[in-house]
Image (tube, rainbow, N blue to C red):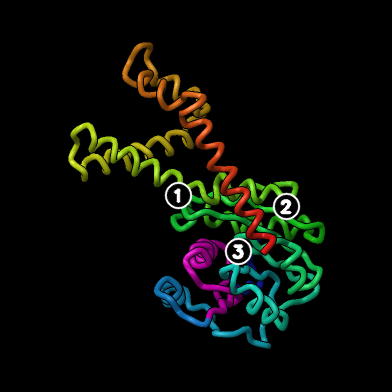
Amino acid sequence: MTLQGKRILVLGGGNMGCALMGGWLNGDVDPNGLLVVDPNRGEALAKLIEKHRFRHETSVPSDFQADVVLVAVKPQMMGKALPALMPALGKRTLAVSIAAGTTVETLCVHLGDRPIVRAMPNTPALIGRGVTGAFANDNVSEEQKEIADQLLSASGQVEWVETEELIDAVTGVSGSGPAYVFHLAECMARAGEAVGLPADLAMRLAMHTVAGAGELMIRSDEAPAKLRKNVTSPNGTTEAGLCVLMDEENGLPPLIEKTVKAARDRAIELSKD
């Protein structure tokens, strides 16, 4: 399956939309078949347009029939933005939404009963290292699912789920997950300061440790648990630290479980608003 010849409309030219478009335009997508609709032309969008010379409009034109629409606007803008898409949609136009908390049912209310993919990316998509959870409704053909997979994988890994409810769980783990990792780096840096390190050095050590460990997990054939055990010598420094961190009552396991559940539950609440 190739994206060549596909007419793609992107509703919303913000950071995430631009991250995806940048990946497409470096691949098979023809700039002449790409239209972005956004009332504003931010810095990231302006740079992409200057480089690739694709079309930008402030509202949906009547002369563009899309094969695929990417909905990349904020959830609070959906009620106004989605109905405006109708002139560009055919009966089988695929709609791919990356708007948080917006259900397939809500999308169908505004766009009609059509092929829809609901996706939850995360912020490392901005550097092509994201992971996106995706769900396809029953109207999506295998060919359209492949198209959606190619479009979303421009920003990193794509993982498909069988039920839409699991998108809320994806939100709790990977959608919100980068913020958890950023805070982990903050906490490690503060702890480094508490034991005498200069603040800037503590932050550099924490950031590069988190980034390096993440890259090692991706590149290694071994599971994270095995990697952890590999660097944990009996009665050593790492074991001493892990005894605190892995405490089943007060350590990281119950804290992370509560964190993910809180984010998942909030995602469910937002989808009902």
Tell me the SS state at disc 3. Answer: loop
Q: Do labels 2 and 1 touch, CB within 8 Å?
A: no
Q: Quadrant of the C terminus?
A: bottom right
State the image quarter where residue 114 is shown.
bottom right
Asked whether residue 26 is in view, the answer is no
| Residue that lies at the very extreme toward the top in this rendered image | 234
Q: Amino acid at mark 2?
A: Glu
**Segment colored magenta:** 11-38
Would you say residue 33 sits in the magenta stretch? yes
Q: Amino acid at mark 3?
A: Ala
Q: Amino acid at mark 1?
A: Ala
Which residue, given by chain and number where applicable, does mark 3 sit on?
99
User: Tag on residue 164?
Assistant: 2
The first of marks 2 and 1 along the sequence is 2
Q: Position of residue 182 (x, y in %)?
A: 40, 46
Q: Position of residue 106 (x, y in %)?
A: 73, 67
Query: Separation of disc 2 and disc 3 at Cα?
Result: 14 Å
Q: Position of residue 218 (x, y in %)?
A: 48, 37
Q: Residue at x 60, y 64 (%)?
A: 99
Q: Residue at x 48, y 50 (%)?
A: 129
- Label 1, residues with CA under 10 Å away: few <14, some 14-19, many ≥20: few
Q: Position of residue 31 (x, y in %)?
A: 55, 74
Tell me the SS state at disc 2. Answer: loop
224 or 245: nearer the viewer:
245
Above or below, comparing residue 45 to residue 204 in the picture: below
Q: Residue at x 53, y 79 (%)?
A: 38
Query: Separation of disc 1 and disc 3 at Cα?
Result: 18 Å
Which residue, given by chain and number where applicable, does mark 1 sit on?
179
Would you say residue 12 sits in the magenta stretch? yes
| Residue that lies at the very extreme toward the front in this rendered image | 249
Q: Quadrant of the N terminus?
A: bottom right
